[in-house]
Image: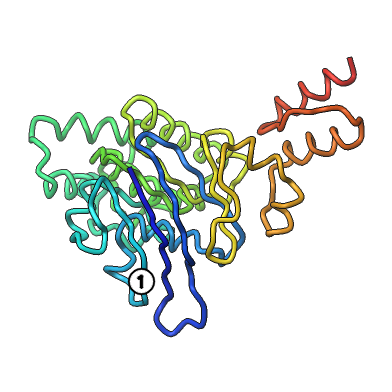
Amino acid sequence: MIELQSLTFRYAGADRDALHDITLTIPDGAFLGIIGPAGAGKTTLAHAIGGIVPHAVRGDFYGAVRVDGLDTADTRLTDLSRIVGTVFQDVESQIISSVVEDELLYGLENFGVPREEIEERMSFALEEVGIAALRHRTIASLSGGQRQKVAIASLVALRPKILVLDEPTGELDPSSSRQIFSLLQKLNREYGMTVVVVEQKIMLLCEFAERLAVLSEGQIARLGTVRGVLGDIAGLEAIGVNCPRSARFSSLLGEKTGQPVPVCVNADEAVEAARRLIG
């Protein structure tokens, strides 16, 4: 379980809080999406869950963050990383090896994974992320999107209890983005991993996440199921959230027809909603 209690954080030298008085509980096995406009505090929140804030970032930290019962402020990052696997928005900052295979091996060996499990874990991660063919390639020869996949595969191989990903598909094309989210859903459902994702591709996120947290000016402005949150299109757009077109369509359809229309989270649902009204 992830518990944030009255969390407030202000970066050193900043004139306002990046996060202000956030209280949030994320149960084990949840799949939570975090959205919001630029500067809302999404990355800072992700870093706070992983312990990067306050251990590796200077600033004023108040309140508490507990992960799997551990207070992140009192627990070493090396110990937290055994529980929380984090993919940064800037993947270059977390890749340390020169060859793809070595990047995965580094974490597995340092976390003491039994030798007889290493090959199976590596093969699974590389295959599921779609980079098995890159196993022996040098990191320097990879594109930005491929490096992003390597960072994700490295975490998948470790199988932490919690995965926190900050815009994991930022460098990826639509097909690869969907592949990553399908993998996250599989890890969530089959392995029970808690998944927390900060993502700008809201329509894609809403297809896979179970709940959404909307941040605005460092605070949680909305929290609930995907359909529940998307049911307030006007409120979200006032905050600066670019809502999925399917959700905007279902909202507009309801307004124009005066009939109740369920919130649509993808194009197929929007088409079906229109069909039902047309008769």
Q: Which image quadrant is residue 241 in?
A: bottom right
Mark 1 surroundings within 10 Å by alpha-carbon count, few (fewer than 14), some (14 through 19), many (20 or more) = some
Count of numbered circles in the view: 1
Residue at point 26%, 38% (across, down): 159
Residue at point 69%, 59% (across, down): 240
Identity of the amino acid at label 1? Phe
Q: Residue 200 in the image: state x and y as whole percent.
A: 57, 51
Quadrant location of the N terminus in the rendered image: top left
In-image side of 15 versus 93 (left or right): right
Q: Nearer the viewer, residue 195 or 157?
A: 195
Q: Residue 96 in the image: state x and y as whole percent.
A: 24, 59
In-image side of 107 versus 227 (left or right): left
Q: Which image quadrant is residue 48 in?
A: bottom left
Which residue is the site of mark 1? 61
Tell me how the rendering is colored.
rainbow
Direction top: furthest residue: 279
Q: Residue 21 in the image: state x and y as whole percent.
A: 47, 64
Q: Could you tell me which secondary element the residue under label 1 belongs to?
A: strand
Residue at point 88%, 37% (across, down): 255
Quadrant location of the C terminus in the rendered image: top right
In-image side of 174 versus 93 (left or right): right
Q: Residue 166 in the image: state x and y as whole percent.
A: 44, 53
Q: Nearer the viewer, residue 116 or 147?
A: 116
Quick check: 207 above or below 59?
Answer: above
Q: Nearer the viewer, residue 162 or 129?
A: 162
Q: Nearer the viewer, residue 212 or 149?
A: 212
